[in-house]
Image (cartoon, rainbow, N blue to C red):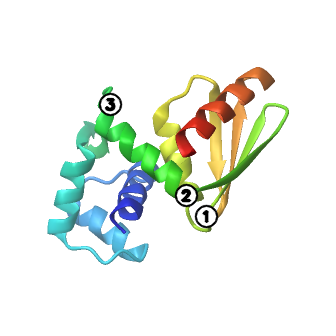
Amino acid sequence: MKVNRHAKILELINKYRIETQEELAEHLNREGFKVTQATVSRDIRELRLTKVPSDEGKQRYAPHRSADSSMSEKYIRVLKDGYVSMDMAQNILVIKTVSGMASAVCAALDAMKWNEVVGSIAGDDTIMCAIRSVDDTVAVMDKISRIVS
């Protein structure tokens, strides 16, 4: 449950400009995660989220940008938990996930900041990634295969 909640938090802070713990708790509760402010506070600490300036001059939550191995471990765990299969069509990579996990897995992939990935979009159980070339698509598939196996 915690892994799913952490994945949802990463998804939410990438999707919305969340400024407070209370606002994050409201979003999580709307998504079906029954959380308290204390739980959100612990999650923020465990995910090592930080506040960064937003375009409007306010502060918002964002993942801490460092080569921190514990953060990448969380992304890897989300990818492993949600991954079902993948296939390629030229330079488009299609990843199938557990139902409802595509957004979280997509957010984890985006957070990995692989240079080969131009961008990605997620539905309920499917992710489409635009990759720079066919060779890069094969390389990304190899990276994902190593992570999920």
Answer with mark 1 or mark 2, whichever residue precedes in sequence: 2
**SS under mark 2:** helix
Give the mark nearest the N terminus, 3 or 1. Answer: 3
Q: Amino acid at mark 2?
A: Gly
Report the disc number at residue 98: 1
Q: Which residue carries the number 3 mark?
A: 65
Query: Does the residue at mark 1 contact the one at mark 2 (Cβ under 8 Å)?
Result: yes
Question: From what the image shows, is residue 24 above or below residue 56?
Answer: below
Label 3: how many Cα within 10 Å (few below 14, some 14–19, many 20+)? few
For this orientation, the residue located farthest to the right is: 90
**CA distance for labels 3 and 1:** 28 Å
Q: Can the viewer see residue 54?
A: no
Callout count: 3
Question: Residue 18's quadrant in the figure?
Answer: bottom left
* Of labels 3 and 1, the one closer to you: 1
Residue at x-position 66% and y-position 62%: 125
Local secondary structure at mark 3: loop
Q: Residue at x 29, y 31 (%)?
A: 68
Q: Nearer the viewer, residue 67 or 50?
A: 67
| Location of mark 2 (residue) | 82
Residue 80 in sight here:
yes
Estimate how packed mark 1 is, as few (under 14), some (14 to 19) or many (20 or more) residues with alpha carbons within 10 Å: some
**Label 2 neighbourhood size at 10 Å, few (<14), some (14-19), many (20+)?**
many
